[in-house]
């Protein structure tokens, strides 16, 4: 993620109070069945009750082999000693091939699914916000190196959810595509993952299950041996 995406996240966070009213209404409506659920939705899992379950994270991919490494990991500033050498508030997962399956690392309600033009490189991406409860939010930014809004809409339409719908841990969140046509000057195709607590972008590491933490660390050390996932 870059600075403009951070700006988007900050403004998305600022709109939370306005959105909460709509979100509550939408949750109430969904109880009465007036909002159709996604075709991929399955029975509620153990974390299906926002506010009661503890926030914990699985990996955001279906197959580890579809990602080659994490670059960069989380660093709170440019001077943390992180081997990538700059600030980055999240984990960037880089696909190994031309597409990769994304799954929900945690349950929640889709708050936003936005086709977004990155101000830094002019490329188009899809920013997904999922709210676990009042405190915790996570983001999945699909950065397929799209050069047009139309390509980004193809990426958007690969995600079988809409704002207001509930996702459960492990739900299919579509495939991350590659629209770079070989031009990686704007960066690698990336799945950016981050979490926020009470409006603050924080290190996700303590929230991963032990298995997920090990898997994410393995992806990071594939690129940076002996590195940590987060540098506060
Ligand atoms: Zn990123």
Image (cartoon, rainbow, N blue to C red):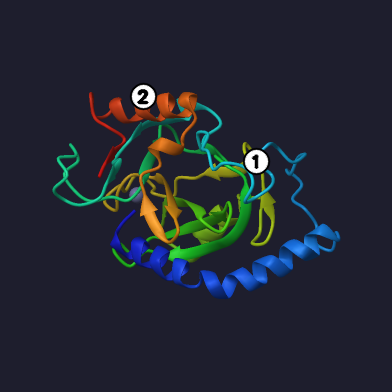
Residue 119 visible, this orientation: yes
Q: In this rendering, would 166 be left or right of 232?
A: right
Residue depicted at 69% across the width and 47% down the height? 49
Instruction: Choose top left, top right, bottom left or bottom right for residue 9.
Output: bottom left
Q: Position of residue 211 (x, y in %)?
A: 48, 24
- The spot of residue 24 in percent (x, y) is 69, 66
Q: Closer to the camera, 60 or 157?
A: 60
Identify which residue is drawn at 30% across, 47% down. Answer: 184
Location of mark 2 (residue): 218
Q: Quadrant of the C terminus?
A: top left
Q: Residues within 10 Å of mark 2 (few under 14, many from 20)?
A: many
- Return the residue at label 1: 47
Q: Nearer the viewer, mark 1 or mark 2?
A: 1
Comparing 134 with 215, the one in front is: 134
Q: Can you give x and y, in whole percent of width and height, for residue 186 in the image?
A: 29, 53
The answer to whether mark 1 is within 8 Å of ligand 1 is no
Neighbours of disc 1 within 10 Å: few (<14), some (14-19), many (20+): some
Dot 1 or dot 2: first in sequence order is: 1
């Amino acid at each position: 993620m870059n600075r403009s995406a951070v700006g988007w996240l900050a403004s998305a966070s600022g709109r939370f109070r306005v959105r909460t009213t709509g979100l509550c209404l939408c949750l109430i409506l969904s109880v009465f069945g007036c909002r159709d659920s996604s075709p991929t939705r399955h029975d509620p899992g153990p974390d299906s009750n926002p506010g009661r379950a503890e926030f914990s994270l699985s990996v955001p991919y279906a197959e580890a082999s579809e990602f080659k490494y994490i670059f960069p990991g989380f660093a709170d500033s440019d001077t943390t000693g992180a081997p990538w050498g700059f600030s980055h508030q999240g984990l960037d997962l880089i696909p190994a091939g031309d597409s990769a399956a994304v799954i929900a690392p945690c349950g929640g309600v889709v708050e936003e699914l936005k086709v977004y033009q990155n101000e830094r490189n002019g490329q188009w991406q899809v920013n997904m916000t999922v709210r676990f409860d009042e405190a915790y939010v996570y983001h999945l930014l699909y950065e397929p190196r799209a050069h047009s809004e139309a390509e980004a809409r193809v990426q958007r339409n690969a995600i079988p959810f809409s704002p207001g719908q509930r996702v459960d841990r492990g739900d299919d969140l579509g495939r991350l595509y590659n629209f770079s046509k070989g031009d990686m000057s704007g960066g690698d195709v990336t799945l950016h993952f981050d979490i926020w607590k009470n409006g603050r972008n924080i290190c996700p590491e303590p929230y991963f299950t032990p298995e997920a933490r090990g898997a994410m660390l393995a992806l990071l050390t594939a690129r940076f041996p002996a590195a940590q996932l987060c540098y506060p």
